[in-house]
Amino acid sequence: MPKPPKARRVISSEKTTVKATVSLQRPATGIAARWYAAGVFPGKEDVAERHLRMQGFHPFVPRCEKTTRHARRIETRPAAYFPGYMFISLDVALQRWRSVNGTFGVRSLIMQGERPLPVPSGLVERFIALTGRDGLLDFSGGLAAGAAVRILSGPFAEMIGRLDRLDPAGRARVLVAIMNGEIPIDMDSRELVAIA
């Protein structure tokens, strides 16, 4: 007696496409979603970010401007603020987080034992808040060269000065009027507030 043919399960490509599109639109923003750090191959942050997005993950690479000099040519371009690393929002209980390790451009998630190690709460959110419309980190906090500023802490606390220079890393030089002259003081821009 011949055996009856086995039933085959047919998955339509239409349903698969809809599921993939929905997962790309919905970030892992549940209560259990946290930010995790992943190591990437040198210079492959953009590639890794693109491939993770295609899989439905939500990566974030903090970027700043980097100036390079080569053969009498100076070039300024966006570069990763933490070269070789990126952040990924994951819900490790619901998402297939192990597939991140096999993504093109990614070395592996930063692990603690058998589980990914979450970054401290609020760290990545702060980087996202400091990212400007151009996609680059902006540590100036609305400060501009030539503006009057008040120093908030340190030996010159509560003194008023003029902002002379502000670099992309958040370091500032303030000119403070002391003894009939202006002396330059180098400090962190977080210790300054602009005066209207």
Image (cartoon, helix red, strand yellow):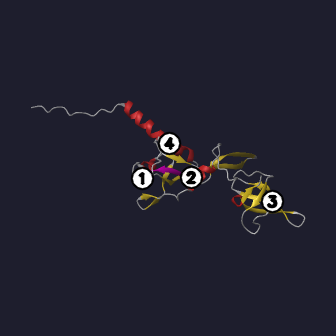
Name, please, the residue furthest toward the bottom.
155
**Disc 4 or 2, which lies upstream in sequence?**
4
Q: Secondary structure at mark 2?
A: helix
Q: Which residue is mark 4?
A: 53
Tag 4–tag 1 contact (CB < 8 Å): no
Q: Position of residue 150 (x, y in %)?
A: 76, 59
Rendered image quadrant of residue 178: bottom right
Marks 4 and 1, Cα distance to the nearest angstrom?
17 Å
| Dominant SS type (magenta) | strand
Tag 3–tag 1 contact (CB < 8 Å): no
Marks 3 and 2, Cα distance to the nearest angstrom?
31 Å
**Residue 161 has which mark?**
3
Q: Which residue is mark 1?
A: 92
62 up-or-down from 7: above or below: below
Q: Position of residue 84 (x, y in %)?
A: 56, 53
Provide the residue span drawn in magenta: 85-91
Marks 4 and 2, Cα distance to the nearest angstrom?
19 Å
Q: Amino acid at mark 3?
A: Gly
Q: Secondary structure at mark 1?
A: loop
Rendered image quadrant of residue 180: bottom right
Q: Name the residue rendered at 39%, 49% in the picture.
A: 94
**Around disc 3, counting alpha carbons within 10 Å, would you say few (fewer than 14), some (14 to 19), or many (20 or more)?**
many
Marks 3 and 1, Cα distance to the nearest angstrom?
49 Å
**Disc 4 or 1, which lies upstream in sequence?**
4
**Disc 3 or 2, which lies upstream in sequence?**
2
Q: Which residue is mark 2?
A: 125
**Around disc 2, counting alpha carbons within 10 Å, would you say few (fewer than 14), some (14 to 19), or many (20 or more)?**
few
Q: Looking at the image, can residue 53 be seen? A: yes
**Disc 2 or 1, which lies upstream in sequence?**
1
Left or right: where 166 falls relative to 24: right
Q: Position of residue 184 (x, y in %)?
A: 81, 62
